[in-house]
Amino acid sequence: MTPPPAHGPADLVITGCTALVHDEGGQVGFLDDAAVVVRDGRIDAVTTTPAVAGLQAVERIDARGQAALPGLINCHTHTPMVALRGIAEDLPAHEWFNDWIWPIESNLTERVVGLGARLACAEMIRGGVTTFADHYFAMDTVADAVTQSGLRANLGAAFFSSQGPEGRAASLEFALRQSGAADGRITTSLAPHAPYTVDEADLAATAELAREHGLMVHLHASENRAQTDNSLDRHGLTPIEILHRAGLLDVDVLIAHGTGILDRDLPVLRQGTGRIAVASAPRGYLKFGWDTTPVRALREIGIPVGLATDGAASNNTLDVWESMALTALVQKSTQRDPAWLTARQALDHATLQSARAVGLGDEIGSLAPGRRADIVLVDLDGPHTQPVHDLAATLVHSARSADVTTTIVDGRILMRDRRLLTLDVPGIVEELGAELPALIDRSHGKRIQDYEG
């Protein structure tokens, strides 16, 4: 618990909640009858409800019966791909990409990207996500969606070596131009697609640009075991070892998926001098029949593992709440250990570890003074969440994303009592529907790339 807030009116005071807090060691705990005080977009105090009884505020929220959590973070997604939700099901990854997704993506327009991104933002706000890391095309339109929605995001413009040097240059230009946009809510990354679509010279050049400009690199690597085996056959190195040789483990890097990370990769990751993190999206791995991210092994060498959904074309949903529950369950199953991963550990991965993964570990991810006021309120009064014997278990295994009642970013309320305040979902859906016939046409036979693995 922090001291009561300073004198003077606050912008927002939330009272009567049970607040998820981290202690100095990063362990998750809970403060009953808590109050959260917000000033100038940041948390000013986390204290008790009686301590703020006389405090003046522009706005107050009575959150009795609710839990207050740091906003959830989607550490790897492709927001515009909600337009392809459910279009290619029950397929192996190579067929899913080569015969469906990449031919369809050849039809992408900026309008479709913008509409998809807005629909995705609405879905995430309703699910308690306040920050997402996006890796896609036409990213200026995604930045516009972030600005309109009020969310926070790290954005990267994807590129392939098949585009020539222009692809890498465009990714850098976007990252430098959009950094700090949306009143500071947008941060940016360089976004090479993956080691199998971006050659080592291009990866090394990307590492140099990241070092020169202080940018994070966000890419796919070791997505599954087949990719790792193909890399070993072709190069004699795993994708992680290729990243190391290219210098990408000596800059800040966010690695999507990593289900193909081998034991031989762990000392390589440990030796990296950059801030290395992995984003895990367990639902998609279950659908594709892949292994899962080795969360336990990564945690033991100090690599933060953030939670993600990937794009809704493969995952069908942008529900990070589900990712949190699945992470706990899948880890128990793969490790054959019911004591791993605990509900409190799952909450840590969904909050503070995810914040670290997207490079914002000092700004978001916990309810503490000085942090950005990214807060969600979760209703605990439903029959499926009662009685509450262990609040951590209730939040991870019983609560659902639909129990989020209020979503706040930078102290601004984006959803209150389940009502979205920044986006018009019916209007977005109607406009997107008019674009779908041209989007899903595969008769041209084009692919933006070829998938191997």
Image (cartoon, rainbow, N blue to C red):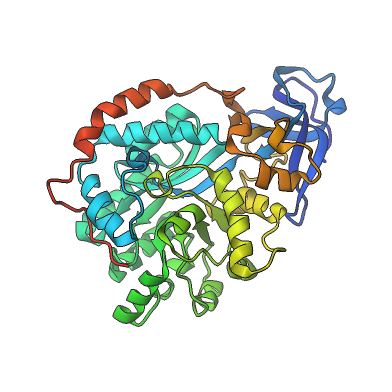
Work out whether 414 lies above or below 325: above
Q: Nearer the viewer, residue 7 or 407?
A: 407
Q: Residue at x 25, y 33 (%)?
A: 436
Q: Quick one: quadrant of the C terminus?
A: bottom left
Q: Nearer the viewer, residue 207 or 136?
A: 136
Q: Residue furthest left?
A: 444
- x%, y% of residue 410? 59, 32
Q: Residue at x 65, y 53 (%)?
A: 346
- x%, y% of residue 296? 62, 67
Work out whether 217 lies above or below 1: below
Count of all numbered marks drawn on residues in the image: 0
Q: Nearer the viewer, residue 276 or 396?
A: 396
Q: Residue furthest bottom?
A: 236
Going by the image, does 285 lie left or right of 409?
A: left
Q: Nearer the viewer, residue 443 or 378?
A: 443
Q: Is residue 343 visible?
A: yes
- The picture quadrant where one finds residue 228 is bottom left
Q: Is residue 247 visible?
A: no
Work out whether 39 lies above or below 89: above
- x%, y% of residue 348? 67, 52
Q: Residue at x 25, y 26 (%)?
A: 434
- The picture quadrant where one finds residue 327 is bottom right
Going by the image, does 77 lie left or right of 66?
A: left
Work out whether 46 lies above or below 26: above
- The picture quadrant where one finds residue 236 is bottom left
- x%, y% of residue 433? 29, 28
